[in-house]
């Protein structure tokens, strides 16, 4: 019997429909109203504590709307992964009414949220909201102590308020265990408060989450540059201008050493590693034999762009020529929303014409053969490698060698 290859535990088995950003005219009535409302975001006045749901529930950014969505039993397909837990699981920003205010915390799924309050980590079931939108619509700005609204160059994401009306904003705190926690900050708070291990923790240095504005805003420790080209159309057709082409090369020609054409698929995209730090929202696709999270990586190599894996931003492991090649620093990582992808079982040569969904085209051989992301159950983990119509299985690197598996799953858009 052919084995099945479920995604890692932190990826849902069913990811929901494709991402459909809301198209807004720059002169729409809604945007004009939001612009007028947003002019006062530096105002330090408190909320009226009896005002109910926070006023700021939708933001317009240069990449589309950022929205707080009410959970209805399923994680929204455009939920923005802001952090990662100590076990590598994705963390999303959540908020809920609590003790006369609206407080900000985190969630790993649609079943419960964890919010810090009064020294404890409070668990909220079902009745909460999740921050959603394009991952490129946000930036993070370093802060220390009290949130400096006057000194910020771009609007912070206001997510709630205390019972006395003090405004609360979404913040990220990095812990010594490598996790990136989601919490709350504000002008009246001396740092970022977040829940962890049943307690309310506080860190003096943190990052506040803001709306993406012009380029040059600090994003994950480096200037943020939106993709220069619009994402390609996500055709569901076969042949012609669709993705299921008989000739699996770029237009039938050899493109030696050039970056693959498909670098942005709406809610998922490739980001270059900077200063050996993982980008802001890497998508965990696998796990190593020791349980460590694995991310898809790609790099220019031997006249092509090859797909492999990484555990961090320092080095990537890519199979080539019978060996596992190590690439230091100069590589890209797949980022975005894990809710937008799904793994489809395959055997042998990739059968693109039979796929019900678009595979993530991620690289090419020196001769132009297209390469896609493959996942393989191996040695107690889920390894990340490459597959194509020309490869009889999925090739991946492990323990210095290039391994191959006849059975695998190809990563595709849901």
Image (tube, rainbow, N blue to C red):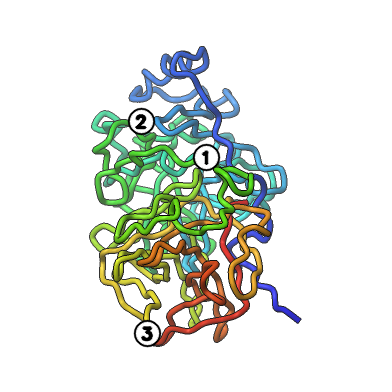
Q: Quadrant of residue 100?
A: top right
Question: Crowding at label 1, few (<14), some or many (≥20) Cα neighbours within 10 Å?
Answer: few
Location of residue 244 in the rendering, given as x and y in whole percent from the top left corner: 59, 53
Q: What's the residue at 47%, 28% (across, down)?
A: 59
Residue identified by numbered label 1: 233
Q: Of residues 197 and 8, which is closer to you in this image?
A: 8
Residue identified by numbered label 2: 155
Location of residue 349 in the rendering, given as x and y in whole percent from the top left corner: 59, 72
Location of residue 32 in the rendering, given as x and y in whole percent from the top left corner: 45, 14
Q: Of residues 108 and 314, which is closer to you in this image?
A: 314
| Quadrant including the N terminus | bottom right
Q: Earlier in the sequence, mark 1 or mark 3?
A: 1
In the rendered structure, the answer to whether residue 284 lies left or right of residue 235 reads left
Q: What's the residue at 40%, 77% (across, down)?
A: 319
Location of residue 268 in the rendering, given as x and y in whole percent from the top left corner: 48, 50
- Calculate the distance from the C-alpha at mark 1 to the C-alpha at mark 2: 31 Å
Q: Earlier in the sequence, mark 1 or mark 2?
A: 2
- Calculate the distance from the C-alpha at mark 1 to the C-alpha at mark 3: 36 Å
Helix, strand or loop at disc 2?
A: loop
Q: What's the residue at 36%, 64% (across, down)?
A: 305
In the rendered structure, the answer to whether residue 291 lies left or right of residue 325 reads right
Closer mark to the observer between disc 1 and disc 2? 1
- What is the residue that sits farthest to the right in this orientation? 1
Q: Of residues 41 and 277, which is closer to you in this image?
A: 277
- Calculate the distance from the C-alpha at mark 3 to the C-alpha at mark 2: 48 Å
Helix, strand or loop at disc 3?
A: strand
Q: What's the residue at 34%, 65% (across, down)?
A: 304
Residue identified by numbered label 3: 323
Residue 90 vertical placement versus 405 (above, below): above
């Amino acid at each position: 019997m052919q084995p099945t290859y479920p995604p890692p535990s932190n990826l849902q088995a069913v990811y929901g429909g494709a991402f459909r950003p809301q198209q807004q005219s720059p002169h729409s009535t809604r945007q004009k109203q939001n612009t007028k409302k947003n002019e006062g975001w530096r105002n330090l006045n408190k909320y009226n504590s009896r005002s109910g749901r926070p006023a700021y529930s939708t933001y317009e950014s240069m990449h589309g709307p950022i929205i707080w969505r009410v959970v209805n039993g399923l994680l929204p397909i455009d939920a923005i992964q802001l952090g990662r837990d100590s076990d590598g699981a994705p963390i999303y920003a959540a908020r809920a009414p609590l003790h006369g205010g609206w407080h900000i915390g985190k969630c790993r799924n649609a079943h419960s949220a964890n919010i810090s309050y009064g020294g404890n980590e409070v668990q909220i079931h079902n009745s909460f909201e999740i921050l959603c939108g394009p991952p490129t619509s946000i930036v993070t700005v370093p802060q220390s102590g009290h949130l400096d609204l006057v000194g910020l160059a771009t609007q912070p994401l206001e997510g709630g308020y205390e019972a006395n009306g003090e405004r609360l904003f979404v913040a990220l705190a990095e812990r010594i265990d490598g996790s990136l926690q989601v919490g709350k900050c504000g002008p009246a708070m001396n740092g970022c408060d977040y829940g962890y291990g049943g307690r309310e923790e506080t860190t003096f240095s943190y990052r506040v989450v803001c709306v993406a504005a012009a380029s040059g805003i600090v994003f994950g420790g480096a200037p943020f540059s939106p993709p220069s080209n619009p994402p390609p159309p996500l055709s569901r057709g076969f042949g012609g201008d669709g993705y299921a082409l008989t000739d699996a090369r770029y237009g039938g020609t050899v493109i030696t050493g050039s970056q693959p054409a498909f670098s942005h698929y709406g809610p998922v995209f490739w980001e270059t590693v900077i200063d050996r730090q993982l980008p802001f929202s890497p998508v965990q696709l696998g796990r190593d034999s020791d349980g460590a999270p694995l991310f898809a990586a790609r790099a220019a190599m031997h006249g092509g762009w090859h797909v492999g894996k990484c555990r961090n931003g320092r080095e990537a492991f890519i199979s080539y020529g019978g060996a596992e090649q190590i690439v230091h620093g100069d590589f890209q990582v797949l980022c975005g929303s894990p809710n937008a992808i799904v793994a489809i079982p395959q055997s042998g040569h990739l059968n693109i014409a039979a796929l019900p969904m678009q595979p993530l085209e991620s690289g090419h051989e020196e001769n132009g053969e297209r390469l896609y992301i493959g996942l393989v159950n191996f040695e107690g983990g889920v390894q990340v490698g490459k597959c194509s119509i020309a490869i009889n299985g999925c090739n991946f690197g492990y323990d210095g060698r290039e391994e191959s598996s006849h059975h695998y799953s190809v990563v595709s858009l849901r």
